[in-house]
Amino acid sequence: MSLSETLGINKKQQAAPLSAAERVAKLRRVVTANTPGGRSIVALDGAPQPVLEFLPGAGLFEIWTDPGGISLENLPGPASLLPPHRGIKCRWFTVLPVPPTVGPAELAAFYDGSFAAMGSVDVRPDTTRHPGMHTTQTLDFIIVIEGQVKLILDDEERLLGPGDVVVQRATNHAWSCVGPVPALLVAVLIDKS
């Protein structure tokens, strides 16, 4: 008997993949803290906040933003592309498949609006390869959780799947979903400006 059979897992019984909106609705962050007496507790258990949703299920879903230094407090404020100066940002983000009916002009307009909503129109020095190309002065650790994405760079591309990790070192890049399943990723961004 296989491990799958032992655990009662049958490929025919597995649920269909979640839509992007259903997946996002299941996102949960658990944040710990210390009481004044030094005892560890759960300070926060719930959905990501803040959220900046571009389309249903697609956007930025903030896990934690650290203002830098030794603070253990989450930095309040709206979701944004960049961490604060000398700070750190941790988030989930989704990359949706682009429907075949969406043309280049419509896709470019979507990215123009998305970067404007993030307050980051100035991080797009060269979008000739893809309208989502951008460069930030951050060291990023990107982990693919679900789905497949293509990491698009100026001169090459890499196909990534669940478990793959990218160390993004302030280079011009974009993400593109590969296949019909929306991709879910986790990003840790560390300001290097």
Image (tube, helix red, strand yellow):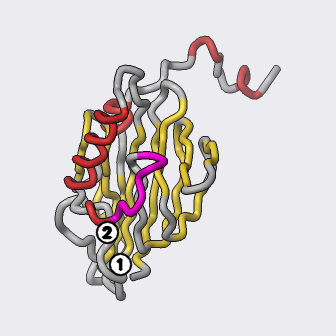
- Choose between 75 and 2: the one closer to the eye: 75
Seen as rendered, the residue at the extreme left is: 77
Q: Pointers 2 and 1 in contact (CB under 8 A)?
A: yes
Amino acid, disc 2: Thr
Task: Residue at 27% x, 76% y: name it.
Answer: 73
Give the percent coordinates (x, y) of residue 163. 62, 48
Q: Is residue 46 visible?
A: no
Q: Main secondary structure of the magenta part?
A: loop
Q: Mark 1 points at which residue?
A: 87
- Magenta-highlighted residues: 123-130
- Choose between 69 and 52: the one closer to the eye: 52
State how far apart marks 2 and 1 are (Cα): 7 Å
Local SS, label 2: strand
Give the percent coordinates (x, y) of residue 38. 35, 82
Locate the C terminus and report the quarter of the image it occupies.
bottom left
Give the percent coordinates (x, y) of residue 174. 46, 51
Seen as rendered, the residue at the extreme front is: 128
Local SS, label 1: loop
Label ID, residue 65: 2
